[in-house]
């Protein structure tokens, strides 16, 4: 321990002259050599040496670990690190000339005037001189409002954002109303999500015919190209139709309805339902967060309006990225029970409950 302390003291003494050539990281037993933690970096900078990189991490509120390239000086600040029951050494990947380190192994004193700083989230401590510091902000936006704050000329469009409540998960969201004081976030759907209220009836399963009575004029199709989300929770705001297209009738996101057949005593009629809605989150980086119902986590739907109405089925793929709802009555409308939540798509594309 004495030798390690001496090495750190010596490096600090020569802090301004540290270079890659004079660094001898072999003395630091807590380093993982020729390995790095991938996909967890907040930002990367160029550092003169490993200690400089560690110092930068210590001054950054979000930094939990670092990857440092001893050849190029690339210093990657990570928002995650190895933890019991979480990320472990198997998550490190081979990377020539890199070293990985958890920042908790480094003494706070190498931060100088920024040691034990209290800069808020999404900021870092910047030295003014040897004795004074100030909190500054990295260009790592956590909302559309922050993007606008950093660059008031920002226009509506797609931006990369990190979400604090989701372990700084990096996601691409669409920023809407950037010319106002209250821009909002939308998730773009590469595959339009759609619902169909068919223009046909088969009330007693004795033959199809046109809609009749109160059902006339209620048919139509719904296409959502983007969905409004609350970034603190990733709840979908289902009645926001800013980026939806309707033919004949408007409908909230994830609502299925028809006026096809009567289903008595909660038993599906022999001709079934024809009202559908398909949620498709493929290539968005998100999946439906499904409510626990063994063996899968499954969101439930319920009849909210209708006569002789029923939820015929709710099916989904293993990842929860595609969900198909069938519902109807004479007429019948089905909607989700509780809020629709999104969760980050698991690494490697494997559905993890």
Image: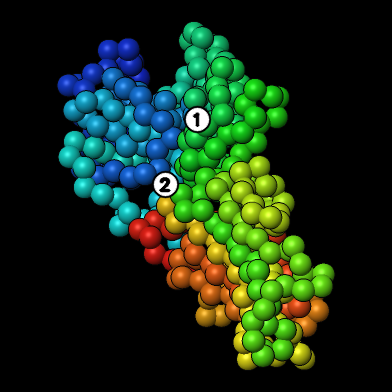
Label disc, if present, on residue 140 of the rendered structure: 1
Using the rendered view, name the quadrant where residue 329 is placed.
bottom right
Image location of residue 192, percent across then percent down: 51, 53
- In this view, the residue in front, 223 or 288, is 223
Q: Which residue: 55% across, 24% down?
A: 155
Which quadrant does the N terminus fall into? top left
In the rendered image, is residue 140 in sight?
A: yes
Say which mark, if any, is on residue 81: 2
User: Which residue corresponds to the image point at 44% horizontal and 56% vertical from the top-left?
Assistant: 282
- Which residue occupies 71% across, 66% down? 335
Residue 76, horizontal then vertical, whole percent: 35, 33
Question: Picture quarter containing residue 134?
Answer: top right
Is 183 in front, or is 289?
A: 183
Q: Secondary structure at mark 1?
A: loop
Element carrying mark 2: loop
- Give the mark nearer the N terminus: 1 vs 2: 2
**Which colour scheme appears in the figure?**
rainbow
Q: Give left or right: position of 159 versus 338.
A: left
Disc 1 versus disc 2: nearer the observer = 1
Say which mark, if any, is on residue 285: none
Residue 237 vs 31, above or below: the answer is: below
At a point 44% along the width and 45% down the height, the residue shown is 80
* Residue 93 vertical position relative to residue 264 in the rendered view, above or below: above
């Amino acid at each position: 321990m004495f030798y390690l302390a001496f090495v750190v003291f010596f490096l600090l003494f020569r802090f301004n002259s540290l270079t890659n050539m004079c660094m001898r990281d072999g003395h630091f037993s807590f380093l993982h050599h020729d390995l790095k933690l991938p996909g967890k970096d907040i930002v990367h900078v160029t550092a003169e040496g490993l200690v400089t990189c560690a110092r930068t991490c210590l001054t950054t509120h979000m930094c939990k670990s670092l990857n440092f390239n001893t050849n190029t000086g690339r210093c990657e600040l990570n928002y995650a690190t190895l933890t019991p029951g979480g990320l472990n050494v198997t998550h490190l990947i081979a990377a020539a000339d890199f070293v990985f380190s958890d920042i908790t192994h480094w003494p706070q004193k190498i931060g100088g005037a920024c040691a034990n700083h209290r800069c808020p989230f999404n900021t870092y401590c910047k030295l003014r001189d040897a004795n004074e510091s100030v909190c500054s902000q990295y260009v790592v936006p956590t909302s559309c409002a922050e993007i606008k704050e950093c660059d008031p000329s920002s226009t509506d469009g797609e931006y990369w954002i990190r979400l604090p409540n989701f372990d700084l998960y990096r996601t691409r969201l669409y920023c809407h109303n950037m010319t106002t004081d209250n821009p909002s976030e939308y998730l773009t759907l590469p595959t339009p999500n759609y619902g169909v209220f068919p223009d046909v009836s088969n009330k007693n399963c004795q033959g199809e015919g046109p809609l009749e009575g109160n059902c006339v004029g209620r048919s139509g199709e719904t296409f959502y190209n983007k969905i409004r989300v609350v970034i603190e929770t990733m709840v979908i705001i289902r009645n926001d139709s800013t980026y939806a297209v309707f033919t004949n009738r408007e409908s909230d996101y994830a609502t299925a309805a028809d006026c096809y057949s009567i289903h008595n005593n909660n038993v599906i009629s022999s001709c079934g339902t024809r009202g559908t809605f398909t949620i498709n989150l493929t290539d968005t980086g998100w999946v439906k967060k499904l409510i626990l119902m063994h063996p899968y986590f499954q969101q439930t739907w319920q009849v909210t309006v209708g006569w002789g109405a029923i939820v015929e089925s709710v099916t989904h793929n293993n990842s929860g990225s595609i969900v198909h709802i069938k519902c109807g009555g004479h007429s019948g409308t089905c909607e989700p029970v509780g809020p629709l939540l999104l969760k980050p798509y698991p690494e490697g594309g494997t559905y993890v409950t």
